[in-house]
Amino acid sequence: MPQDRQGWRVAPAPDGRGTPEEHKPSPPHRWRGFWIFFGVLLALNWLSVLVFQPAGQPRVTVPFSPYFIEQLKAGHVRSISTTGDTVNGTFTLKLRYPPSSTKATPTTLFKTQVPSFWPGSELTALLQGHDVQVNAKSTSTGTSLLAELFLGFGPTLLLVGLFFMLARRASAGGGLGGLGNFGRSQARRIDPNEILVTFDDVAGIDEAKTELTVIVDFLKSPERYQRLGGRMPHGVLLYGQPGTGKTLLARAVAGEAHAAFFSIAASEFIEAIVGVGAARVRDLFAKAKEAAPAIIFIDELDAVGRSRQGSAGITGANDEREQTLDQILTEMDGFASKEAVVVLGATNRPEILDQALLRPGRFDRRVAVQPPDKPGRIKILEVHTRSLPLGRDVDLAALAASTPGMVGADLANLANEAALLAARRDHHAVQMADFTDSLEKIMLGAPRGILLSAEDRERTAYHESGHALVGMLTPGADPVRKVSIIPRGMALGVTLSTPDTDRVGYSREELEAKIHVALGGRVAEEVVYGRITTGAESDIQQLTQIARQMVGRWGMSDRLGPIALLPADGAVGYLLPGVAETSPQTQYLVDEEVRRIVEEAQAEVMRVLGDHRDQLESLTRALLEAETLDAPEAYAAAGVPMPAVAELPAATSS
Ligand code: ADP
Ligand code: MG
Ligand code: ZN
């Protein structure tokens, strides 16, 4: 992506708005200055050699006595010129030094040094006696003025040149740690032509889409909205669980609105140096205002927008985050209502955002991005299978029915896994079996390929049959979809039960049923073998969690009543994070109630499995034989009438 002078990764809007004022010099261009500089240096060096050293003959350094004196006496010296005690001279004929050496080049040029104690009168007499031409030079100007200047200032010039070059490179951007880059926001401006995402690619979250359509309209023709004096929202906060399509939605807005789109993850604001984040925010907003109509998309807003309550500077580590947040608040306040700049924020955790962010005038429009319902899942599957060749047996509605609770990202993943699996199986089109097998892999985990001993295998079969049978016999429990004793991931076996419809809430009875089902595995082992193993760890964690939340969050204990006793997710206690706000007595009561709920459930499950021991046996035998049972097989093996639920499509064994 091209960059403007200040290091933004930018691309202009289609109508040319926001085109970088000056195109970044291309790399050869950027280096040209350096090469010219370098060339000039070389040339100067070469010139100086030419000027200051007569070419052709080397100048040989000879001892003053006896060699020089001897040659002088022999009349071989034509002329000398002295600079201080240094003597440069010429012989009348080419001589070698040392005389015996054959390697030395014969030359007429020589150089020697007059010892200071040598009597000047004697030398003078000799020189005069042999008719030697004598030139004297002042010691201070041994070389020419130009050379002097060059030698004196050369290193400085070199340094200045280098510095100049570095500075230019830094300001040219590069982004690679140029010193000038600290306060620049790292936001990417994305070319609307490059954004291939449109609202057509977003499915199943229609309410959110409708809300954002208004924003898109506004950005396309701001005048229409301003004519009636309306004020468009400055900030729109998209919130919802991960994978529901918040980031996708924001990109679709950019694709639809044909506005300049600046996107940054909030964590990119945070640097080790306090104040840098704030500078980046300032830069980002300034750029966006220049390019208006524009969208600023801050993803994962909670990274800077976390509530400041209770985090009051124990360490000061939050300073940077706070300054950045303050700057965002200030910038959002600073919008003139005319400015067609909309800030989109996205977060998975709206509840921990600072209240100041949610105030009118800032992120005052909040859009929930909900997990899709069944029709929504069909549409999302349609979007993600658009480019796949689908077999005739593929039933997207059935897939949607059997995937309650899955969000867009899960479904996109499912479609992709199915396509990969079909390719591996050399299918010409993606078939239903590819989908169901991928779904099984996603929901249950990939088979681990270890062999269990016969004993472990039997125990696992009883354990899973226990879960399944309790699930079948307990009113209010989710229907059993699949039972398997193929080891996957960390688990030796799996019992999958998912609700029939999309659930938004659970009753107390349904939660108790979940606890019963979770206990089923462990209790079955106890009923059959009379001893228990470590295999129930995750079951125990899960049921304890449910029981605690029933008591402490959902007010389902009559003894404690509807009081919130567990700290909410992400909330910080008054004193220190993690310190409860309830008294030790209350906490004791919570523990008591949790224990009561679980103990009652355990007694009940004991009774059920004891009463239906023969059904447990027949289900276990069927499971040991088939390894994996789908719902109809499992219900048949257990002799329990199957509830009329949407059936999970049977997977071919893979
Ligand atoms: P979030 O930002 O809410 O965590 P993303 O927008 O990053 O989720 O979604 C991840 C991927 O899941 C998207 O790139 C897209 O392929 C798919 N996806 C999620 N929601 C949808 C949806 N509603 N319609 C179509 N695809 C979706
Ligand atoms: Mg996201
Ligand atoms: Zn279990």
Image: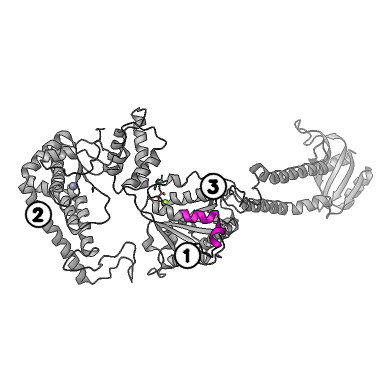
Residue 179 in magenta?
A: no
Which is nearer the N-term, disc 1 or disc 2? 1
Residue 165 lies, in percent from the top left, at 67, 50
Tell me the SS state at disc 3.
loop
Q: Is residue 493 something that shows in the picture?
A: no
Q: Which residue is mark 3?
A: 192
> Mark 2 — residue?
604
Residue 482 lies left or right of residue 349; in this view the side is left
Disc 3 marks which amino acid? Answer: Pro
The residue carrying pointer 1 sits among few (fewer than 14), some (14 to 19) or many (20 or more) residues within 10 Å by Cα, namely many
**Which callout, 3 or 2, points to the residue nearer the camera?**
3
Marked residue nearer the N-terminal end (1 or 3): 3
Residue for badge 1: 362
Position of residue 40 in the picture relative to residue 537 (left or right): right
Task: Provide the residue span drawn in magenta.
Answer: 213-233
**Residue 260 locus on image (x, y percent):** 55, 52
Q: CA distance from mark 1 to mark 3?
A: 25 Å
Quadrant hosting residue 182: bottom right
CB contact under 8 Å: marks 3 and 2: no
In 3D space, how far apart are the residues under numbered discs 3 and 2 (Cα atoms)? 61 Å
User: Mark 1: which amino acid?
Assistant: Arg
Question: Could you tell me which residue is drawn at 85 percent across and 34 percent down?
Answer: 94
Q: Which amino acid type is marked by label 2? A: Glu
Q: CA distance from mark 1 to mark 2?
A: 54 Å
| Secondary structure of residue under mark 1 | loop
